[in-house]
Amino acid sequence: MCSISWVQILSYVTFVICVVGIASKVIKIYGLPIHLRWELYPIPHEKDFRYGGSYLEEVDWWKKPRKKNFLNFVKFLFIEILFVRVLYHNNRKMWYLSFPLHFGLYLVIVWLGLLFLAAVLLALGLSTEHVLILFLQGIATVLGVVGFILAAVGCVGLIIRRATAKQLQGYSAPIDYFNLVFILTVVASGFFVWLGDSRFLTIREYLTSLITFSYAGPLGSAITLHIILFSLFAIYLPFTHMSHAFMKFFLWDKVLFEDEPNLKGGSVESRVTTVLNYKQTWSAPHMHAGGTWSETASKGVDNEEK
Amino acid sequence: MKKNNINVEDISDPSIQMAVIEPENLMPLPYPYDTPDAQPPLKKLTDDQKERYESDLDGFLALKLPKPETKEEEDRLVGQFLEGLKKLLSRENNWTFLMPLMMSLEYCAKCQTCNDACPVYIASGKEEIYRPTYRAEVLRRIVNKYLKRGGRTFAKFTGNEIDLNWKTVARLAELSYRCTLCRRCAQTCPIGVDNGLINHELRKIFSQEMGIAAEELHEKGSVLQLKTGSSTGMNKPAFMDIIEFLEEEIEEKTGKKIKIPIDKKGADILLIHNAGEFLSWPENPSAFAIIFEEAGINWTLSSEIAGYDAVNYGVWYDDAQLARVAVQHAKIAKNLGVKKIVVGECGHAHKALIVVADRVLNGDLNIPRESCLPILEDIVVNEKIKLDPQKNNFPVTLHDPCNIVRLMGIVEPQRKILRKIAPLFREMSPHGVQNYCCGGGGGFAIMPSLNIPDWRSAVSGRMKFKQILDAFQDEIDPNIRKMICAPCSNCKGAIRDLLDYYDAWEKTGIAYTGLVDLIVNAMVDIDGPFIEWPDEM
Ligand code: SF4
Ligand code: SF4
């Protein structure tokens, strides 16, 4: 068995940390207790998303079948995550910079995915000249280069905007600049790899070595630098607020669009029973600390503090 | 001393006045309020009030926080605040909003997009401390610096520079009462962060841990309601007297003899009004009675404690009070054996009882609850009563109460009704779920103390006033009578005060009313007009 290089070890470690980091964030969200409803309209899965209507517009709504337009929700997510439509409508100046950054990074992810797919196919025995490999390689190259450029433009633009726009200055910390510069170095180093390897063959070969657990061979300095920066960023990302890029799904799905009613015998009811039995220890006199929420709620008319 | 270019850290600086609100710096209004002398003055605090209370946020007082006498007392209060903050971030103490709060604290990208959606910030002339992000950022920094490991060490690098002292706490408390909780900001956030929610949670630390809340919301609000029956102080005998008065009024005005059902067991509907209606706008519950009787609905009112007052101020500041009032409402419905509770024209009561308390009312307290608007739509649109729209032949615009529209998605029923009964109906811009708050949200409508009413009419309600003027700009002549329809008691109160503050009836001929009032006004079998214009009262 061939030994593997420290760069490869870094890549494996990155993969594990990144996956565990994202998973732990998601698990944490799912582990949180049910909360009181705090929805905000328009909600895409409601029948009248067009104008922001809800099932509460109907007489005896609880007697009617609950219709959720899942397709509309997916459409909303797709447009919102890919094109940041809310920003487009509400802050065009920011969108001109934020959109290229985010879209560029999504293209970089697709670039990596396509190269990875090509590497898997090669590991499975396809020849390097197979039409599918050539196709994947071609698309990946275009998307990768465009992605690197777009993300770099977005980064530079956002750095300048943060530093110059009055209303952003007071809310921008060294870490915000650090994050943007960090992304910039990652995408710039990727671009430099392309300058020396116009079809990203070295990256594909490197990915093949990772899949097959074989020695990657000596890597050039540009690709080594890119792999290191990319890895460090992938390790860092899940633990920063930059994870909003994917965590915003939960802000919508679990809070702003969460309008599931508490129907008798339904799934909400049992979860509510659990939380009503939590004990609260708030100190203001009217809270009567120490009781469960259920007891707190019933300390109304008869037991109001004197 | 007022400092220019206020930044987030300045909230801890005891040597400065953070904001000074002057009429000339506020957002301009359309004709006839487009000149400097058309701006009413803002009431200033007296020297004595400034001496006694913490007032160096912006010179307005919602909380009347007394100044601590010693450093020890200050430190004790800061400690209490921090303790409350820990509870706010704990599962058992704050399951109610933990997930929304944690995510809103964690994922803000600080892009400042939400600011332009905020009527308070914009109407104030972009006063820094009123940004939706300002108080949220202060709280975020306190959490990151004081409650997270390594927070102090890396505070500068991570942008969490803040000094937690008594000034910070006192100003944060007062600042939590400069947001109407309209949540327009959250609608425009590309990430879904909700600064209105962060403000709501801030108020909870003060109320639930430190016992600090606006007295109109707590002592004279939810506590009084649970003790006497209503936050207005109205007890059962007084309520019964008013019902008698309403019956007489109905007969006098419409010739209809109606017996308003009270505590009727087994009725289909328990209708709960904001008790403010009985006192300030008795024609509103009367109109409900006329419509429901005419449509043959089997309904009742309740005379039990809180049964005749739908308000639930807890929804603005305190989860325990929210739950207590909601449980009381549900218990009354259960004891009466009604099929459902219907909430009258009161927006926050809608949201509190139908939506927010949905996950408090379990088991046999889970009585179906709905808005009055769909039923009214059914009655009007399906012509269960006879209506003549020509009786409402004057320009009408519709105010969308945030709680009913943006926060519940009840948008069309009220419009379908108006299209049917008001031939000169026109929309405000923007409207529906993008509407602007009346300025009375978050409790401001019922906070008459010191100079808050002036702040409400000049700042938080300014955008609404602009919208109203814009909607009627083509007929702004005071001789043309115009009507704002506001299907919410608190919005009505805030709009009433807005119109008074700007002397709008005299200068523009604009008045306000509820939705049912306009419906009854259009009923064919009622001789005279039901609504009264200000010059007829
Ligand atoms: S709350 Fe949203 S819109 Fe406002 S600054 Fe944060 S990320 Fe931007
Ligand atoms: S909830 Fe409304 S008033 Fe409060 S910060 Fe947001 S937009 Fe402004």
Image: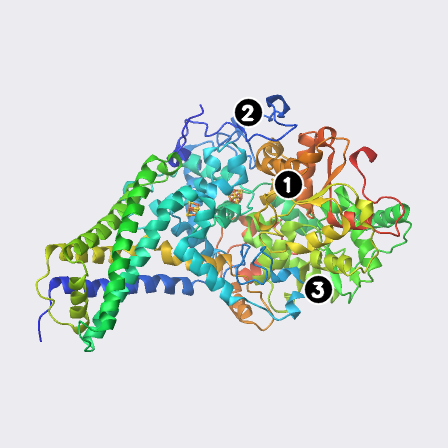
Across and down, in percent, residue B402 comes to 60, 48
Same chain under badges 2 and 3? The reply is yes
Q: Earlier in the sequence, mark 2 or mark 3?
A: 2
Chain for numbered disc 2: B
Chain for numbered disc 1: B
Q: CA distance from mark 2 to mark 1?
A: 24 Å
For the point 82% across and 53% down, the residue is B387
Q: CA distance from mark 3 to mark 1?
A: 28 Å
Identified by mark 3, the residue type is Lys
Residue B367 visible in the displayed image: no
| Quadrant in the picture for residue A176 | top left
Across and down, in percent, residue A141 comes to 24, 60
Residue that numbered label 3 is attached to: B340
Same chain under badges 3 and 1? The reply is yes
Q: Is residue B351 left or right of residue B289?
A: left
For the point 21% across and 54% down, the residue is A190
Residue that numbered label 1 is attached to: B445
Element assignment for label 3: strand
Q: Nearer the viewer, mark 2 or mark 3?
A: 2
Q: Is residue A226 left or right of residue B436?
A: left
Q: Is residue B359 left or right of residue B158?
A: right
Name the quadrant of the C terminus of chain B.
Answer: top right
Across and down, in percent, residue B176 comes to 51, 41
Q: Does mark 3 have its CB less than 8 Å from ligand 2? A: no
Identified by mark 2, the residue type is Glu
Q: Does mark 1 have its CB less than 8 Å from ligand 2? A: no
**Numbered circle sitting on residue B24:** 2
Identified by mark 1, the residue type is Ala
**Numbered circle sitting on residue A268:** none
Chain for numbered disc 3: B
Across and down, in percent, residue B148 comes to 33, 50
